Amino acid sequence: MNAPQRPPNADSPIPSPPNGEQEAENASPGGAGVAQEGGAEAAVASAMLADLKREMNRLQREIRLAIQAQLAQMSGRTLGSLEANRELARSIQEMLDAHGLRVRCTHCGHPAILRVSPRAGAAAGVFVFDHTIDGRRTFHGGRVLIPEIRLVAKPARKPRGEKKAG
Ligand SMILES: [Zn+2]
């Protein structure tokens, strides 16, 4: 019970060889050498790209929200003429396209392009959502005032030449 139990090296002092500096060159304990394994480098690159992707997504989201906040101020208005409204819709579309965005159709929720169409009885035209649904070009909306604008990511293009089986 009371017998002293001392492991042999418990109190051994840290060995300090006389020529410590030279020894250190040969056997540096925590020295991170050059990573020679390809797997380690790939893991680093993959982590770096994942970080970058997260950062890009964050920035993209900020851009989307900033544009949306500005456009929200225009909803419920009209610029008063077909030409002015068309120019506005064109400018919006140009900006959204540059950032891979679309407006969300207020009727069906599909990503769409905001356009202004002439219509009898509406001198300044009407705002419509132009989108493709089930392979067919479809227009929704049709009000004389700028609709509520929600932005969504532009859908990925379908690969060309790929047809449905059957
Ligand atoms: Zn729609």
Image (cartoon, helix red, strand yellow):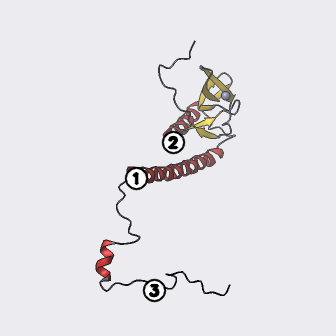
In the displayed structure, 157 sits above or below 161; it is below
Q: Secondary structure at mark 2?
A: loop
- Badge nearest the viewer, 3 or 2: 3
Tag 3 and tag 1, C-beta contact below 8 Å: no
| Quadrant housing residue 102 | top right
Asked whether residue 125 appears in the rendered view, the answer is no
Q: Secondary structure at mark 3?
A: loop
Q: Residue at x 46, y 49 (%)?
A: 46
Type of residue at label 1? Glu
Q: Dot 2 corresponds to which residue? A: 99
Asked whether residue 121 appears in the rendered view, the answer is yes
Type of residue at label 3? Pro
Sequence-earlier tag: 1 or 2: 1
In whole angstroms, how far apart are the C-alphas of marks 3 and 1? 39 Å
Q: Residues within 10 Å of mark 1 (few under 14, many from 20)?
A: few
In the displayed structure, 2 sits above or below 93; it is below
In whole angstroms, how far apart are the C-alphas of marks 1 and 2? 32 Å
Type of residue at label 2? His
Q: Dot 1 corresponds to which residue? A: 41
